[in-house]
Image (cartoon, rainbow, N blue to C red):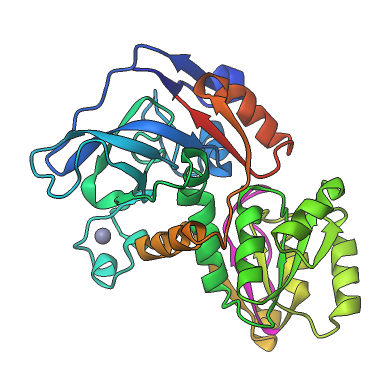
Amino acid sequence: MRAVVLRTHGEPHEALAYRVDVPEPTPANDEVILRVRATSLNRVDTVLRRGYPGLTLQLPHILGGDIVGDVVVRGEGVQSLREGTRVIVYPIVWCGTCSLCRKGLEHLCLRWQYFGMHRPGGCAEYVAVPERCCIPIPEHLSDAEVACLGVAGLTAYHAIEAAAIGEGSTVLVWGATGGMGTFLLQLARHRGAYVIGTTRRTEQAELLHSWGADWVLPTHPPEAVLQAVQERFPEGIDAVIDYVGPATFPISFALLRKGGRLIFCGILTGRETTLSIHQTYLRHVSLHGIYLGTRAELQALIGLVTDGIVRPYVAGVHPLSEAPLLHQRMEAGAIVGKTVMVP
Ligand SMILES: [Zn+2]
């Protein structure tokens, strides 16, 4: 089959190769084989390509946590899915028996497997997926739109939940033109929040306003963001969603009001930083790390998209063979919204 394989870690054109002779997967008893209709590029793919800290990938490896596809083969134990059904894949395979799965926290499963990370992903013609990860999708949603939901959309949904965003909340989103930003702004607005978005691309301010940003600020220098927000909100803001990391952490922390929440969901500028324990308790700050979300949250997000309340912003649809170029563009910060690939 056709696929983009990660053959070594490094720069996009050296690490990624488009192949036409990759062996097709075969289904386990509880799995179906999907013919992939679309996948989308996420920040984590570039991190995995460079070498994800603490994780040894079996190379060659197929990236891609976002999968939309048609069921073409059914394992013997598959109960309900029929051939030809179009589905989105919940990006985590959970065991169902560990202590966290039993609490309904399948995204925190102790034996979790993430598509494109712990098992082959969607950058291929076919992929094997357990039946329980497949969610049929309404006909009127396009493949490209649906391909944006499983990773960036779900993480954004979970972040908004974790940040307890509601009517009248104030929230800041760093790098709001990115794939997650598009969802964060729309979801925060939907909940009635006052939304501040930062971007390196201030020429996109109108677009950010259309997604839900009340106020758009240039990301650089972050100290200027702090100054501007503190002038308008001298007591601080309710929540900051930060996937940038050490480069923005001190500013994110300083932006919060007493009792505010800081949501971490990325390591784009490094893995470690310095924290004042003293200020954390004196200011009653909550620090909350997240990745992805629950299957029920993905279904809730699909509902919002089905009802037209949230619209994925597709920057472009490209053939899989362009994956190296698209990785390069993402790392250069040249992509606004979500980039979709089709095999
Ligand atoms: Zn589990």
Estimate the x, y position of residue 1 in percent, counting from the top left: 33, 17
Quarter holding ligand 1: bottom left
Estimate the x, y position of residue 302 in percent, counting from the top left: 44, 58
Q: Is residue 136 above or below residue 100?
A: above
The boundaries of the magenta stretch are 258-276
Q: Look at 28% across and 54% down and name the residue there.
A: 111
Estimate the x, y position of residue 105 in percent, counting from the top left: 33, 67
Q: Look at 66% across and 69% down and name the residue there.
A: 189
Q: Quadrant of the C terminus?
A: top left
In reply to whether residue 64 is colored magenta, the answer given is no
Q: Look at 67% across and 59% down and name the residue there.
A: 273
Estimate the x, y position of residue 294 in percent, counting from the top left: 39, 63
Q: Name the magenta segment's main secondary structure.
A: loop
Q: Look at 45% across and 20% down and name the residue there.
A: 7
Q: Is residue 97 left or right of residue 136?
A: left
Q: Is residue 85 above or below residue 311?
A: above
Q: Is residue 57 left or right of residue 245?
A: left
